[in-house]
Image (cartoon, rainbow, N blue to C red):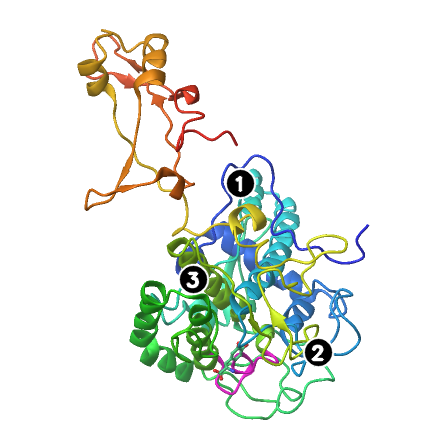
Amino acid sequence: MAQHVVITGVPRTGTESTPPTRREINDFVKDVKPFSLFIQALQAMYQTSQKDGLSHFQIGGIHGLPYQQWETSGGNRPVGQWGGYCTHGSMLFPTWHRPYVATYEQTVQAHAVQIADTYTTSDKAQWQDAAVNLRLPYWDWASNAVPPSQVISDAKVTITGPNGQQTPVDNPLLGYPFNPIDPSFPDPYSQWPTTLRHPTSDDSDASSNVEELISDLQSDARDLRTKTYNLLTRVSTWPAFSNHTPGDGGSSSSSLEAIHDGIHVDVGADGHMGDPAVAGFDPIFFLHHCNVDRLLALWEALHPNTWVTPGPANGGTFTIAGNATENATTDLTPFWNGATTYWNSNACRNFETSLNYTYPDTENVEGFVPLNEAIAAHSGLNSFDPRVVEPYLKKELSWRIQKADRSSVDISQLPSLQVVVVALPLHLHQGEMFPKAGTPVHHHSITEGKPGGHQAA
Ligand SMILES: N[C@@H](CC1=CC(=O)C(=O)C=C1)C(=O)O
């Protein structure tokens, strides 16, 4: 038995064929069930004792302060110059944050499942379903530089509670109230009872200056969009993509980490988000990093043959020595993936299968090619009966991939391609003008075993 929390992502239920989608925050806040469950799950994590490894405080504290061991990973004190576990300025910046976000996500979702079980409404099953499918929302700051009011300014948010009543509750997305303020915190963090964005002062009665926050994000909006576009379309090596240490033709401002740094500063200014030592305590950190992970996912899709290259640890972390070399198999501590092993970059490269989530942008794309006319014209069978057509198509159906410039692409270069044949039975009822469609029937044996054909799960 493992003596520590194991990061699995949200557990698979067995009934889902593709993993559920992480959704953009503007869309997410409008969907009553996931939003209500998310808010209540955050409340539960805030109420969990700060001594518990899965409290909001302890997960947030993996990143930087209190610079302590989490879930038995590493020793009693940092081995690198930086006391937190997060890897900054290093090749591992994008991939370290992947299991980190998954840690928060699996904890939120586990609470949501328990909360959904307490609903006494007639649509309880739908609440339970919403909990099973709940994933962390991401804040796509390249499209929507200013997050919705539920994330930055609403003191109260309205949720539908377990009795079905709409209830206004204190908004946990505005900040985390420390309970207590950790004794390791230096000034001014030792003064502030809650996380702050653009704090109005260093005193204990400081508040967040939301107008200033909005104004900073608005002035950065165009820049964020252009930089993100350039990142996806022009940056093509891992050293230049991954982190803000200039490398491989990259610059200190065009990498994923550099763009992400700007958001930290825009959101936090002199508050928690602006300082890696305490940024992980602000709940917006996880919406932001969910988007950083999405950009990694998009970049992976655009550069399927490029991945983590070896590089210096740049000062190290709680567990990584400052002069170490990191690569795709370096342990992403403290994220255990078993009793004695940790996640590494290779293990979480395919996030859909390893951590059980997807993004709207990377979900399966589906297209249909009707075969009726071709079968009628070429087969000479005089029938659409599947028993007649199936053996014919097994023998004759072929496909190839061609680019817009008509050059062909080797099918083995596109492992995700799946061609399947589906028959749609039509029934013409008496007196009706058009036939009604029945249930589609798959004929997987037609394409199975051929390159790009049906792949058994
Ligand atoms: N220190 C970064 C901003 C920053 C990055 C982080 O990764 C973080 O957690 C908090 C803040 C900068 O000044 O640009």
Q: Nearer the viewer, residue 205 or 10?
A: 10
C-alpha distance separating marks 1 and 3: 31 Å
Q: Quadrant of residue 106?
A: bottom right
User: Badge 3: few (under 14), some or many (20 or more) residues near its Cα, within 10 Å?
Assistant: many
**Magenta includes 268?**
yes
Disc nearer the start of the sequence (2/1):
2
Residue with the mark numbered 3? 295
C-alpha distance separating marks 2 and 1: 41 Å
| Residue 67 located left or right of residue 294 | right
* Local secondary structure at mark 2: loop
Magenta segment, which residues? 267-278
Q: Position of residue 128 (x, y in %)?
A: 58, 43
Q: Give the answer, above or below, for where 361 lies relative to 291.
A: above
Q: Which numbered marker is on residue 319? A: none
Q: Position of residue 221 (x, y in %)?
A: 32, 74
Q: Which numbered marker is on residue 67? A: 2
Q: Give the answer, above or below, for where 19 lies relative to 452.
A: below
Q: Residue at x 67, y 88 (%)?
A: 190
Residue with the mark numbered 1? 126
**Magenta includes 276?**
yes
Q: Nearer the viewer, residue 402 or 290?
A: 402
Q: Amino acid at mark 1?
A: Gln
| Residue 399 located left or right of residue 377 | right
Disc nearer the start of the sequence (3/2):
2
Q: Give the answer, above or below, for where 338 lies relative to 399.
A: below
Q: Residue at x 25, y 26 (%)?
A: 370
